[in-house]
Amino acid sequence: MRSNLMKEGASRAPHRSLLKALGITDAEMKRPFVAVVSSKSDYIPGHTHLDTITKAVEAGIRNAGGVPFTFNTIGVCDGLAMNHKGMKYSLCSRELIADSIEVMLTAHPMDAAVFIPNCDKVVPGMLMAACRMNIPSIFVSGGPMMPGTSGKRRLSLTDMFEAVGSCAAGRMDESEMNELENKACPGCGSCSGMFTANSMNCLTEVIGMALPGNGTIPAVEAARIRLAKETGEQVMTLLKKNIRPLDILTPAAFENALRADMAIGCSSNTVLHVTALSYAAGCPISLEFIDSIGKSTPQICKLSPASEVFLTDLNEVGGIQAMLKELDCAGLIHRDILTVNGTVGERFSKAPDADGTVIRRLDNPFRQDGGIAILFGNLASEGAVVKQGAVKPEMMVHSGPARVFDSEEEANDAILGGKINSSDVVVIRYEGPKGGPGMREMLSPTANIAGMGLDDSVALITDGRFSGATRGASIGHVSPEAASCGVIALVQEGDMISIDIPNRKLELLVDEETLASRRPLWTAPAQSLSGYAKRYAQHVTSGSTGAVFDDMI
């Protein structure tokens, strides 16, 4: 056993003494030691209940003959970090989480690990760490929040961010906003729509690192506790069979994950995270490959924020496994590859058929292609990302004058100040991985645009990124970023920009001669950075490579 590095032999008597200080018996010393890595915290709604999940996992490990040891990681709630300096640290936390787990599991050698994430950057950070350590591992998330309700209307956090814009435009008064505020987020769990947290938890299930149900069983249901207990038991089976993450995270598994991503309309952040994970697993994927999967995968689910359908609805009709079963009818799924409990095909064979409404059948998809599109052009020679499944039909092709802002704050002030007009293309730059640093999410400006009723006539482009709660013609991850003198740095107020999502084009309608004349005049804005943010900016790569550190490329 790997744990014997710290518990076997005469030279390890001091180590055993320390372990016995924890109450470990001589009998337990001979059993496998299993790490339980939790992101429990009291200030993240998606994580506040993870102590309950942890206890169930620990019980499962003991049931199967292992000895659990729990430690916690950090976690950032993107909703609480939104539209202030805190958001600069959200994406940054992914690498910090992966590094810290590597430290803990190397300093304290365990035989296997159960990972308990729920929100946003914790999921990919833990997955990246699992690849690095490559010990038998399995995941169980905390599960999605129930949707809020106001009368017959169901709510999510999207409604709250859009309410800010609605109030600014006089379309809602403060009493109405206060009513929504009290009802939109009814309890624990990751935000209720197909936002980044739920997207990543669903993809963790698809890629084979979690048991069926991981992505959709609500946080408040007893089924989630049972799933956690079964997860603790299953990690011992993985240990016995010596099945490790890199046995599961193969190119075929990544293709399955991308198929699912496109079919259910996941957050655009998944492009960053799946790309980063592919580097950690040793089988890097490109934006071009991601787009090829998108072009050949129909979108058969449309969930909030693109509709009023929620994760709970998907769970009730068979969840992720029912969706995979439908995709398999077209031969789009690698069914014979390994997961933490059998093959992909064995898992979804037990699922119900698509219900035709929440999970549409292949002959009646929401779209013929996937929920995410990758755009290229002179404005994004290395690529840009849009959640096309949440774009209104009239904005799939759009051109308009650039309204240029060098920070999210400047753009928000202009939007809420009524300075953005129909047909405008809002450009927010110097918010990329290096330029932010940290590639802030732009939920506030996109939600303000939608809340003011401009999402059918105004587009937004940024080298930053978006929340999974974003909807509308919001194009992010523009690469190269402005801080690297990408063309987005050369855009001037009033320049015409052309967006053609069906044809995957993003163009600044300015000739190359003019751009060449602007380049010598460009200088990067001065940054005053310290601590982790400074180190991050020095080592982070482009959004087109998942914003991983340069030592991974």
Image (cartoon, rainbow, N blue to C red):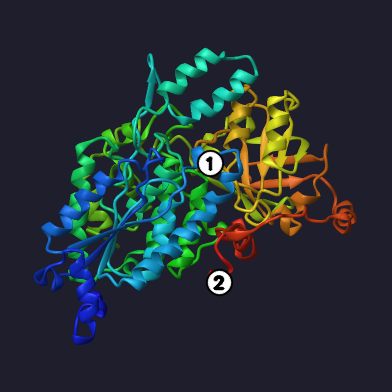
Describe residue 175's horizontal placement relative to residue 33 as left or right.
right
Report the quarter where the N terminus lies: bottom left
For marks 2 and 1 on the same chain, the one whose residue lies earlier in the sequence: 1
> The disc labelled 2 sits on which kind of residue?
Asp
Which residue does the image show at 19% across and 86% down from the upper left? Answer: 10
- Label disc, if present, on residue 364 of the rendered structure: none
Residue lying furthest left:
27
Residue in view at x 73 percent, y 53 percent: 482
Residue 502, can we see it? Answer: no
Residue 263 horizontal/vertical position (percent): 42, 44
> Which residue corresponds to the image point at 87% horizontal and 57% vertical from the top-left?
516
Q: Secondary structure beneath disc 2?
A: helix
**How many residues crowd mark 2 within 10 Å: few (<14), some (14–19), many (20+)?**
few
Q: Residues within 10 Å of mark 1 (few under 14, many from 20)?
A: some
In the image shown, does 83 or 489 lie closer to the viewer?
83
Please state the horizontal and vertical placement of residue 376, each as a whole percent of the image.
66, 52
Query: In the image, what residue type sits under mark 1?
Result: Ala
Which residue corresponds to mark 2? 551
Residue carrying label 1: 81
Q: Is residue 84 above or below residue 523?
A: above
18 or 354: nearer the eye? Answer: 18
Q: Residue at 32% of width from left, 33% of height from top?
A: 312
Image: 183 above or below 386:
above
Residue 237 point in image, percent of width and height: 17, 64
Q: What distance separates the C-alpha of mark 2 from that of mark 1?
A: 28 Å
